[in-house]
Image (tube, grey):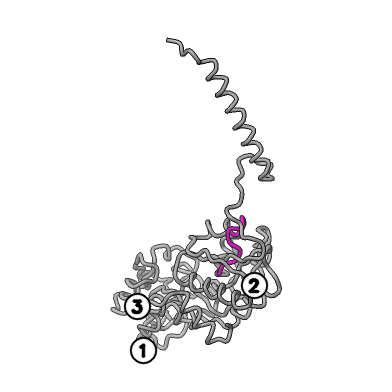
Amino acid sequence: MPTPNRGRVLRSVRVAAAAAAIALLTTVSACGSSDPTATAPASSAPAGKVVVGSFAFPESEILGEIYAQALTAKGIQVETKFNIGPRQQTIPALRDGSINLIPEYNGNLLAFYNPKYTERTTADVDKALDTAVTADKLRVLDSAKAEDKDAYVVTKKTADDNQLSTIGDLSKIVPFKLGSNPQFGELGYGIPGLKGVYGVGTKAKEVTFVPIEDFGGPDTVKALVDNSVQVADIYTTSPALVANNLVVLGDPENMISSQNVIPLVADSVYTDQLGEILNKVSAALTTEDLIALRDRVEGKEKASANAAAKEWLTQKGLL
């Protein structure tokens, strides 16, 4: 049965649709993009404000707090957006202005831009980064001495009994078991590097790889302390190194790329004052500091990242 006012309703619908289409076109034009599917940046920072971000793990939040508090103390307006996620999220956030500054790790950041990079030392990695990040209108400042990277670790007893100080010295204790995350068996600084760079494990059954899923966490540490494995891959800022009196073996061949903490900042907010403040922070920050900071936040004390950062900055005379 026909609807009595159907013609009037259809005309009203057409008018409304046309108005909506015009509004949509106006909105797209206002974005200033030639791509009608492009979206506007998500909440760019107001002029004069620096938005500090972090990755989604405690150490990064601590570093973000250090940066934010150091800048605030010198009169720079700061906002924080922590626990964002991996680089697949943080780099786009830097590009669109959602954040303007984040504590980074130079080797992994370079790998994001160039997965086949060959630089290994801090100086070489930083030099390559200077160029790599410019495409995104970003810049890196000075690297800290502090590094958070993979390391070949043994107990102090194993080191003392066998006079181990470097990765190459592991040839003295073959055969041995090495515990690490499953990917370590294929990484260039993992089992292949151990063989190719240091000549350890080139013969059958010299090195038995034991995959452990927690990426240098409690299970890996327990396996090492219990002697279930004699060597383990544990990150250099793990509080477990001090708590369990573990020894990080030296890497004189730079098989493992540098992973220095480094500020990554957007050109849009960079000033000489900001650079000077953050470079002073980097000059004061050591790996031992990171271990202590992580231990305060992640250990028994359960201090807040905010409090731990403030006390560190105060001790270093940066507040």
Q: Where does the N terminus fall, quadrant-wise?
A: top left
| Residue 148 position in % (x across, y down) | 49, 74
Residue 124 seen in the figure: no
Residue 299 seen in the figure: yes
- Within-10-Å neighbours for mark 3: few <14, some 14–19, many 20+: many
Q: Which badge, 1 or 3, comes first in the chain's sequence?
A: 1
Q: Where does the C terminus fall, quadrant-wise?
A: bottom right
Corner quadrant of residue 76: bottom right
Q: Nearer the viewer, mark 1 or mark 2?
A: 2
Which mark, by number, is residue 230?
Answer: 3
Q: Is residue 300 left or right of residue 105?
A: left
Residue depicted at 65% across the width and 62% down the height: 133
Q: Amino acid at mark 3?
A: Gln
* Distance between the alpha carbons at the discs numbered 1 and 2: 42 Å
Q: Which residues are magenta?
A: 94-104
| Residue 316 position in % (x across, y down) | 55, 86
* Distance between the alpha carbons at the discs numbered 2 and 3: 39 Å
Q: Which badge, 2 or 3, comes first in the chain's sequence?
A: 2
- Seen from the viewer's position, the closer of residues 243 and 219 is 243
- Within-10-Å neighbours for mark 2: few <14, some 14–19, many 20+: some
| Secondary element type, mark 3 | loop
Q: Is residue 108 left or right of residue 226?
A: right
Figure check: 228 above or below 45:
below
| Secondary element type, mark 2 | loop
